Image (cartoon, rainbow, N blue to C red):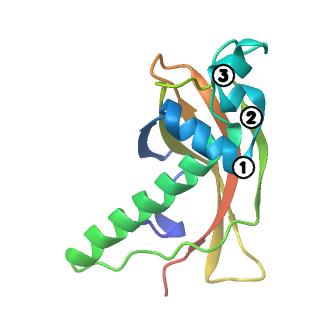
Amino acid sequence: MTAFFDDIRVGDTLELGEHTFSREEIIRFAEKYDPQAFHLSEEGAARTHFGHLCASGWHTAAVFMKLWVATHEALDAAALAAGRTPARLGPSPGFEDLRWIKPVFAGDTLRYSRVVTGKTESRSRPQWGLVHSDMLAHNQDGKLAFSFKGTVFVERRRS
């Protein structure tokens, strides 16, 4: 279940799942949102420093968000089925240091995770705390391909 702010510890890791990026999916995303040559065709990509068709960084970020939401929905459903109340997640006030470290080529699989790096009690919203995390995606070779530092409001336990 989504843990309450009070129960989250620095170093906690949450596996979000993995995603394999197909050629068709890369092109479809790029046509709608990031129409650069290296995302649209092998021929276009061959003329760039990438050399091969690769996913938009925004595509890798969108998949992170999809897996983040799906993971928390599944954790919450399991908690409710067991008679427990999950903590609510609030909005994110933002993120920092978004990095696309390695290109993601057609057929590559990214494994996404979150590692808690810190916590801050909210002065303006005492029923909430801020959880700071490294959001990571490693490719099928175990190499870090994508990362950012994220922050999200998490509900505190009621006294």
Label number found at residue 33: 1
Q: Residue at 68% x, 51% y: name it.
A: 32
Q: Quadrant of residue 98?
A: top right
Residue bearing mark 3: 102
Instruction: Classify 116 as above or below 55.
Output: below
Q: Residue at x 66, y 72 (%)?
A: 91
Residue 134 seen in the figure: no
Dot 3: element: loop
1 or 3: tag closer to the N-terminus: 1
Number of residues whose C-alpha sits closer than 10 Å to that of mark 2, classed few (under 14), some (14–19) or many (20 or more): some
SS class of the residue under badge 2? strand
In front: label 1 or label 3: 1
Say which of 49 and 115 sits in front: 49
| Residue occupying the point 35% across, 64% down | 75
Percent of width and height locating residue 142: 49, 20
Q: Residues within 10 Å of mark 3 (few under 14, many from 20)?
A: few
Front residue (pair 101, 54) = 54
Q: Which residue is mark 2?
A: 99
Residue type indicated by callout 2: Arg
Q: Which amino acid type is shown beneath numbered disc 1?
A: Tyr
Residue at x 51%, y 30% (from the top left corner): 23
In the image: residue 68, left or right of residue 44: left
**Label 1 CA crowd tier, 10 Å (few <14, some 14–19, many 20+):** few
